[in-house]
Image (cartoon, rainbow, N blue to C red):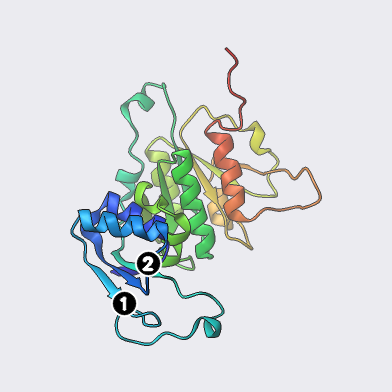
């Protein structure tokens, strides 16, 4: 299935990772922005069609609403890109040889019915930044991995493997069988995130924006932790909470060693 991307960074990442899946780039009006100029140049190198579309159309001859009617600017360009295919759980949870020797540890994520595509996109971007090994997303009652997620991720979906699963409870069992430990996040947990040891391969499970982890999901976690507030606000957006937790588990929260 093809989706339309409006962020030049997400398009450029797709061109660099899988140019054959980029169907075409559509440019409207005059000179494109610097970001889109880079996309057009990369498209030319890979012989990807660049179509000049009339301003005010969607590239297919249909007239768009005026900027004021939509309440936002019409983008100067866009691209049609095929969606990436997800992996099976065995591939997603495969660990590297050095991890089996205890020399390094990996981190994976699972999203339990996260519904806002901007949150999902931000989580993929965070995962790409911190080197998360893979992400499990639930299919039902969750944000689909469409254009909005790709654009917010700003290239994150091109470098982080993912798997879409219907039954998260079975997914957590599969993670354990693969040698991962399952860490759930809950504001009701007794253990603080800072007390969690990062000495193993973790699958970090983040819950829904309003309800958090479902009961069956929480029951299948090896342990639960909370991010304890230090100020006047009692909770964090799920994408921000994910960034805090991932940073802690991969060691970015630790000060650099003085030499």
User: Which percent across, then down, holds residue 111?
Assistant: 50, 54
Q: Is residue 200 above or below residue 32?
A: above
Looking at the image, which is closer to me, 77 or 125? 77
Residue 194: image tag: none
Looking at the image, which is closer to me, 14 or 227? 14
Q: Nearer the viewer, mark 1 or mark 2?
A: 2
User: Which percent across, then down, holds residue 210?
Assistant: 64, 63
What is the CA distance from the residue labelled 1 to the residue labelled 2? 12 Å
Residue at 45% x, 55% y: name it. Answer: 153
Q: Is residue 23 left or right of residue 128?
A: left
Residue at 26% x, 72% y: name it. Answer: 51
Q: Is residue 171 above or below residue 192?
A: below
Nearer the N terminus, badge 1 or badge 2? 2
Q: Is residue 74 visible?
A: yes
Residue at 57% x, 45% y: name it. Answer: 243
Q: Is residue 32 above or below residue 16?
A: below
User: Which percent across, then down, holds residue 75?
Assistant: 44, 71
Q: Is residue 226 above or below residue 25?
A: above
Farthest left residue in view? 47
User: Which percent across, then down, holds residue 126?
Assistant: 50, 47
Instruction: Pick the quarter of the image with the C terminus.
Output: top right
Q: Say what secondary structure mark 2 lies in.
A: loop
- Number of labelled discs? 2
Q: Is residue 238 left or right of residue 156?
A: right
Circle 2 is placed at which residue position? 31
For label 1, the crowd category at 10 Å Cα-Cα, with few meaning under 14, some 14 to 19 and many 20 or more, is some
Q: Say what secondary structure mark 1 lies in.
A: strand
Instruction: Pick the quarter of the image with the N terminus.
Output: bottom left
Q: Quarter-wise, where is residue 229 in the image?
A: top right
Residue 53: image tag: 1
Farthest front residue in view? 30
Q: Quarter-wise, where is residue 154 in the image?
A: bottom left
């Amino acid at each position: 299935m093809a989706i339309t991307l409006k962020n030049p960074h997400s398009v450029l990442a797709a061109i660099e990772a899988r140019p054959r899946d980029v169907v075409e780039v559509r440019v409207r009006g005059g000179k494109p922005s610097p970001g889109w100029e880079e996309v057009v140049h990369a498209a030319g190198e890979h012989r990807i069609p660049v179509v000049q579309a009339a301003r005010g159309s969607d590239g297919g001859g249909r007239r768009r609403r005026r900027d004021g009617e939509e309440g936002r600017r019409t983008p100067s360009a866009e691209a049609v890109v095929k969606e990436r295919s997800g992996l099976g759980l065995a591939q997603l949870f495969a660990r590297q040889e050095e991890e089996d020797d205890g020399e390094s540890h990996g981190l994976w994520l699972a999203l339990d019915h996260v519904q806002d595509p901007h949150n999902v996109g931000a989580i993929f971007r965070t995962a790409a930044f911190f080197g998360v090994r893979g992400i499990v997303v639930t299919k039902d009652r969750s944000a689909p991995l469409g254009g909005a997620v790709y654009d917010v991720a700003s290239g994150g979906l091109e470098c982080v493997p993912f798997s879409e699963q219907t039954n998260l409870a079975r997914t957590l069992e599969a993670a354990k069988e693969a040698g991962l430990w399952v860490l759930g996040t809950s504001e009701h947990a007794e253990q603080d995130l800072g007390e969690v040891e990062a000495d193993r391969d973790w699958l970090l499970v983040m819950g829904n924006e309003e309800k958090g982890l479902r009961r069956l999901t929480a029951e299948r976690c090896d342990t639960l932790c909370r991010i304890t507030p230090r100020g006047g606000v009692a909770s964090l957006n799920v994408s921000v909470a994910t960034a805090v937790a991932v940073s802690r588990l991969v060691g970015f929260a630790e000060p650099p060693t003085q030499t």
